[in-house]
Image (cartoon, rainbow, N blue to C red):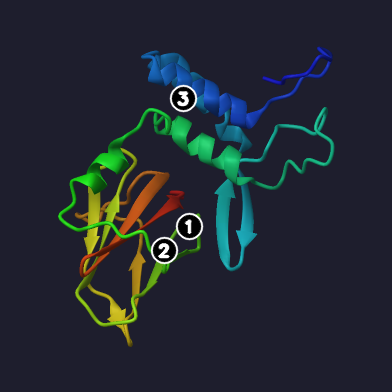
């Protein structure tokens, strides 16, 4: 699990383990893929970001061979590959998000993003803020990593085109969704804004 010419160093590279898991799953060996994904479970760490307790994956299991690595601090890359591995999603093979957006009835605009999502990742609720500069019909769709719509949120507060949504990690029937990466798609008039958010189920 550790790439080094020094074979006496026994280490565990969390990113690489996620890569291995996704590779096996992508090529049909689900059992071996989930085996490697499950090896990461005991390595999850909790940390406070602002007022939110978050969970994530550190860079490695120990510091031998990795100078300056803190095993008690989660990093984005390892955490993302852990989520992908646990959900059987290989980002290099998935076209679901792209296909779903291409089939939308709304036009895509390449404006700078005015969509803010925080905290990210989240465990309880996430706030989605959008500033459009004008009042217009605005709604929010949430898609899972397979491109399936899990929630539509139509109610938002608006003050001079400033829209605020909250999502509590539930699907249409109120059931909590699984840990994973979700696409936040905001539709305002003929404009689309997209953002990805990581939900970690407690």
Q: Residue at x 26, y 53 (%)?
A: 171
The tag on residue 122 is 1
Is disc 2 placed on a helix, strand or loop?
loop
Is disc 1 placed on a helix, strand or loop?
loop
Task: Report which residue position mark 2 lands on.
Answer: 125
- Residue 116 in view: yes
Residue mark closest to the camera, 1 vs 3: 3
| Quadrant the N terminus occupies | top right
Residue mark closest to the camera, 2 vs 3: 3
Q: CA distance from mark 2 to mark 3?
A: 28 Å
Question: Relative to 135, is 42 above or below?
Answer: above
Question: Relative to 46, is 53 above or below?
Answer: below
Q: Residue at x 39, y 15 (%)?
A: 27
Q: Marks 1 and 2: CB-CB under 8 Å?
A: yes
Q: Residue at x 24, y 56 (%)?
A: 151
Task: Give whichever of 112, 97 is nearer the camera.
Answer: 112
Task: Report which residue position mark 3 lands on.
Answer: 22
The tag on residue 167 is none
Q: Position of residue 46 (x, y in %)?
A: 62, 50
- Residue 148 in view: no
Q: Residue at x 30, y 83 (%)?
A: 158
Question: Relative to 64, is 35 above or below?
Answer: above
Q: Earlier in the sequence, mark 2 or mark 3?
A: 3
Q: Position of residue 24 (x, y in %)?
A: 45, 16
Q: Quadrant of residue 56?
A: top right
Q: Position of residue 29 (x, y in %)?
A: 40, 13
Q: Is residue 171 left or right of residue 193?
A: left
Task: Give whichever of 78, 111 is nearer the camera.
Answer: 111
* Residue farthest toward the bottom in the current orientation of the protein: 160
Q: CA distance from mark 1 to mark 2?
A: 6 Å
């Amino acid at each position: 699990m550790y790439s080094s010419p020094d074979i006496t160093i026994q280490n565990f590279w969390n990113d690489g383990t996620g890569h291995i898991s996704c590779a096996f799953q992508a090529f049909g060996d689900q059992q071996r893929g989930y085996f490697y994904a499950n090896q990461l479970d005991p390595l999850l760490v909790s940390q406070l970001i602002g007022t939110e307790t978050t969970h994530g994956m550190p860079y490695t299991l120990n510091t031998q061979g990795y100078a300056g690595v803190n095993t008690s601090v989660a990093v984005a890359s390892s955490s993302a590959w852990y989520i992908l591995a646990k959900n059987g999603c290989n980002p290099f093979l998935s076209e679901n998000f792209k296909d779903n957006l291409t089939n939308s009835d709304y036009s895509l605009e390449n404006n700078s993003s005015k969509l803010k999502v925080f905290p990210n990742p989240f465990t309880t609720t996430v706030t989605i803020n959008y500033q459009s500069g004008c009042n217009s019909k605005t709604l929010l769709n949430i898609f899972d990593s397979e491109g399936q719509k899990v929630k539509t949120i139509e109610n938002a507060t608006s003050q001079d085109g400033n829209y605020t949504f909250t999502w509590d990690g539930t699907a249409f029937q109120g059931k909590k969704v699984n840990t994973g990466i979700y696409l936040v798609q905001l539709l305002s008039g003929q404009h689309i804004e997209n953002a990805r958010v990581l939900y970690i189920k407690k």
